[in-house]
Amino acid sequence: MSLRRKLAFVALFYVIEGFPMGMYRGVWPVFFRRHDASLTEIGWLSALYAAWWAKVLWSPLIDRYGERRQWIAGGLVVMAGALVGIAGTGVGERSALLWLLLAVYCIGSATQDVAIDAWSIGLADRGEEGPFNSMKATAYRGGMLIASSGLLFLPRWIGWPGTFLVGAALSAALAASVFTAPAVPVPRASREQTVVPLRRWLSRDGAGAVVLFVMLYRVGDAAMGPMVSTFWVDRGFSDEEIGLVSHLVGTYAYVAGAIAGGVVVRRVGIGRALWALGAFALGSNLGYAAAAAWPETGDAGVYAAALFESFCGGLASAAFLSYLMRICDREHAAVQYALLTAIYALAGSLLAIPSGWITERIDYAAFFALTAALAAPAFLFLPRARRWIGREPAAAD
């Protein structure tokens, strides 16, 4: 199969993967804040991110049973059902049932993520990581945009219950599209064994450095995430403005960063790109810190912070995802990639849960600056962690 055709299917699957995250990060915090939730309560939404680090517990089932497209479609159907339930719980009633439905939605999303990531690793040939991950980052952000930007234009016209029903319909439509993509066969040996290969993989020299690097490299963004949308709300922006500027225009900036990052990865290699592009990501959080510290910069300051953060996020994601993809064995990609992303998700969720509580006490500016500092220690572990990449050419055409 040609690289172009592969990338077309990758685009479809990562739109699918990005859509629920746009709901989780872009829509739910605005919904909660519009219904008088405190920052502390919104921070507790991050506890639901446990689904993304707990997914490693059931990832062996995805390697062992069924076909990966079936898992993806099944996850989307579960999410559609959860959104129908959320629409019927009552606007602004943050009941136990609502929290349960939110949790079910997140579990469905995390499950499809395992299958999608394993499917893409099985499809890619060595050396295709750069283009693959530029497309993955771009399409993922596009999927987030459909939810976080598109759906935020609807509450004014059809209310929040209607908005969640539209989200359910879109999830069902995406489920129907999954089987237009080719199946990626799973070797029989990987279906029969999962624990032993994982133990062998984790016993490699430098595994501790890899774990700590993966845990910390993107943790600043994960910690900051729950407070970004509430920051826009508290600065007086409407839902439409948040959707248009923070999400829509921000997506263009992210895509530009992801494309540029993919070019850098292809030309200088994954290891060098992790150093250079990661440094940009550290600085991006400081843009939001500056906008919060100097409110006299007005709307322009917030716009600039959003665009800079999105562009730098795209740069760093292209390098980071290429690293994760390269160090996984294709035969056991579901479990190994799920473990790596679970490590990243665990660190991010533990720091994001108290994000609202911390922000209420030290303000947005100090909190955003703090998140920039959280990721800096990752670079202490990068020299050892990059050894798992293997030998790379100095440049690629």
Image (cartoon, helix red, strand yellow):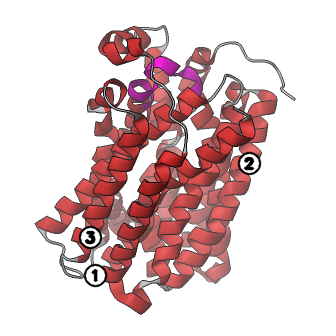
Residue 374 image point, x, y percent:
48, 43
Give SS at disc 1: loop
Q: Quadrant of the C terminus?
A: top right
Write the residue at 68% across / 48% down: 258
Mark 1 is on which residue type?
Asp
Vertical placement of residue 46 versus 307, above or below: above
For the residues marked 3 and 2, what is the alpha-carbon distance in whole angstroms?
36 Å
Give the residue displayed 24% in from the left and 55% down from the top: 103
- CA distance for labels 2 and 1: 39 Å
The residue that disc 3 covers is: 84
Distance between the alpha carbons at the discs numbered 1 and 3: 23 Å
Q: Is residue 358 left or right of residue 368?
A: left
- Which residue is the site of mark 1? 36
Residue shown at 81% from the left, 31% from the top: 267
Range of magenta residues: 325-337
Disc 2 crowd rating (10 Å Cα; few below 14, some 14-19, many 20+) is many
Looking at the picture, which amino acid does disc 3 mark? Val
Q: Secondary structure at mark 2?
A: helix
Q: Secondary structure at mark 3?
A: helix
Please state the horizontal and vertical placement of residue 200, each as a whole percent of the image. 39, 8
Measuring from the top left, give residue 245's x and y in whole percent.
Answer: 61, 75
Q: Report which residue position mark 2 lands on.
A: 259
